[in-house]
Amino acid sequence: MAPVDLGPLHGDPPDPSPAIGSSVLLKEISPAALEAFITAALAEPSEALVSVELRHLAGAVAPGRGTGGAVCDVDGEGLVYCVGMIPAPQLAAAVTSAAGAVVDAMGPFASARVVKNFAERPVDAAALYGPATDRLGRIVESWDPHGMIRVGHPIPVASV
């Protein structure tokens, strides 16, 4: 399947849409984690959300399976992602609050790591890149010593 065909498979809108999402990487998908997820997903505030998903992670993204890149695996058993549409600015607060409530409910099962593809706001580089953070900082220092390249998730320059 071509990457362009993945959006309709998931039910994503074909064009950019105003939305706010939030996620949390889970260390485990245990019965207690599932109970917390279901309770949060069915709670009244989550009505502001279009989707509340629990994605099982394993296979090619499991630790030790990847062979390339700064982060080639995901050290977590699952990922919770929730999103809400914001057709009018006044709806942003309700969606942000609802997504935050779901993520907070999953806190006891959360990993310290964050999956970059689901980090919609800047987060600490160590949460994204783990042990590779220092190595990436040295690369940034070497290739972009003046900080000309701007990214949504800044990588701190390694201290030499």
Image (spheres, rainbow, N blue to C red):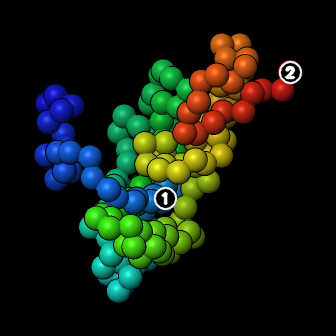
x 17%, y 45%: residue = 14
The residue lying toward the viewer, choosing from 70 and 22, is 22
Looking at the image, the residue that sits furthest to the front is 89
Q: Residue flagged by tag 2: what amino acid is it?
A: Val
User: Label 1 vs label 2: CA separation?
Assistant: 33 Å
Residue drawn at the location 45% of the way across and 28% of the way down: 66
Local secondary structure at mark 1: strand
Q: Looking at the image, can residue 36 be seen?
A: yes
Q: Residues within 10 Å of mark 1 (few under 14, many from 20)?
A: many
Q: Are marks 1 and 2 in contact (CB under 8 Å)?
A: no
Residue 24 lies, in percent from the top left, at 49, 58
Quadrant location of the C terminus? top right
Q: Which residue is mark 2?
A: 160
Which residue appears at 38% of the width and 48% of the height? 57
Q: Is residue 14 above or below residue 70?
A: below
Residue lying at the far top of the rendered structure: 143
Residue under numbered circle 1: 24
The reply to whether residue 76 is visible in this rendering is no
